[in-house]
Amino acid sequence: MSSDIAIQLDGISKRFPVYSSPTARLVSLLLRQQHKADFFEAVKPLDLVVRKGEFLGIIGENGSGKSTLLQVIAGILSPSSGRMHVHGRVGALLELGAGFNPEFTGRENARLNAAILGLTDREFEHRVPEITAFAGIGDFFDKPVKTYSSGMYVRLAFAVQACVEPEILIVDEALAVGDIFFRIKCYERLEKLRRNGCTVILVTHSMEDVIHYCDHALLLNHGEVLYHGDVMEAVSHYYALGNIETSSFSNAGGGNEEASSIGDQYAEWPSVSFADLSSRDQVSDGSVICRAVALTDTSGKPKRIFKQGETVHIYAEFEALRDLQTVVAGVVLRNEKGIILHGKHSGQDDLPVPRFVKAGTRLRCRYDIELSIHTGEYLVDVTIGGYAQQVYEARYRMTMAELESAACRHCVVSAAATLGVIPAASHGFAVQPFYGLTNLVSRSQIMQLAGSQGSLNGNPLERDYREG
């Protein structure tokens, strides 16, 4: 085996017996008749090689087998099949407070964890100042762990594992508990450990962390490896998993039917499969129902994973159940935390809107959004609303509060669709073209004063920075 390999798994799997009743479990344990039990394969046979100093991200939806795999690598669980070689001292943060005795103080638990990792008392005492400084829990270091908050648990646990410098460090979602400042400090320490030759395996649902820190990524789904390799490709596949439609599909009337234009131009209705929303919850006043939704790229191809700066076309078809006045179509884009990044309706674009819609009429809406936003998964809400004709005619003379109170929300479909946004490239500034939730039109300047070396005579260097 190569000397630069830290972890090698050959056909490793893990399955758990599933019994029909507690009695069946007891009989199996007493009589050793596990062959009569059904088995659940949490991790299906897989091969994996992680080299020394690498930063591997393991991603997947809940229940994909990520934590089980880490417990096998850490030696907490025995594999059901295959061979495993782990070379080096392993530090693991697999569960909040795992291994801590709640009656012991933080110092006592830290000493015990350090001893498990092979440190002597003298070595531990030498590292105590570093551990306490990194944990940042003050006097609580000498108080029972049962008095700790969840954040203090993970601060102490990570401080011990990182400061004793294991050769392999396994982290399973533990950093998600800490605040942003602690997470930044943790990743800085992980980078330092990696530079010193430590191998890091990270399980997280934060694709941003995977993109920024991992050398390669392993994507699991129902215990099976779907992809292993380039981080960007793995993240794309991960987002695709969450965007697979499980409902039935329809053509929503096809793309060749006539449609009356409500503007100067009418974009041809795409001939793609639309998600059937007949079983989806809709908030409606009884006058409109949403029949179908589809997402495409600018060429009209169905798409759910977009690169930053690309434009998504969101199509929605509604049916008027009764006569309507002055109808507007809206869309809202929310992130996984429910924060609204964008919300707008056709009236705000100052485009012509239907002034009267008869019952039975189908309304086809298209929303175009340039995705100059942070990478991640997003929820798409679509809506049809409207105003009384006299209100809409007077819209430029009314306050926002007055318009809001006069608006009719005929139909709102929350999470009608989802989409994923990934960086435009794997290297360079295109991986992170801006910081924050969204890209704003901005200008950056730098000026070199006259008389300094390479003077530009005080002329500023200017450039507009905009996505795309």
Image: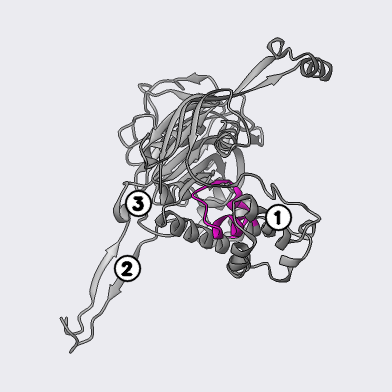
Identify the residue at image location x=37%, y=27%: 270
Q: Observer-nearest residue: 380 or 89?
A: 89
Q: Per the image, is 160 magenta?
A: yes
Question: In the image as oriented, which residue stretches furthest toward the bottom?
Answer: 451
Quick one: SS at disc 2? Answer: strand
Name the residue that disc number 1 marks. 150
* Label 1: few (<14), some (14–19) or many (≥20) C-alpha neighbours in 10 Å: few
Question: Which image quadrant is residue 435 in?
Answer: bottom left
Dot placed on the residue nearer the N-terminal end, 3 or 2: 3
- Give yes or no for contact between labels 3 and 1 (Cβ–Cβ under 8 Å): no
The magenta-colored residue range is: 157-179
Q: Amino acid at mark 2?
A: Arg
Name the residue that disc number 3 marks. 431
Name the residue that disc number 2 marks. 443
Colour scheme employed for the rendering of this structure = one colour
Identify the residue at image location x=40%, y=47%: 371
Q: Amino acid at mark 1?
A: Ser
Quick one: SS at disc 1? Answer: helix
Cα–Cα gap, marks 3 and 1: 33 Å
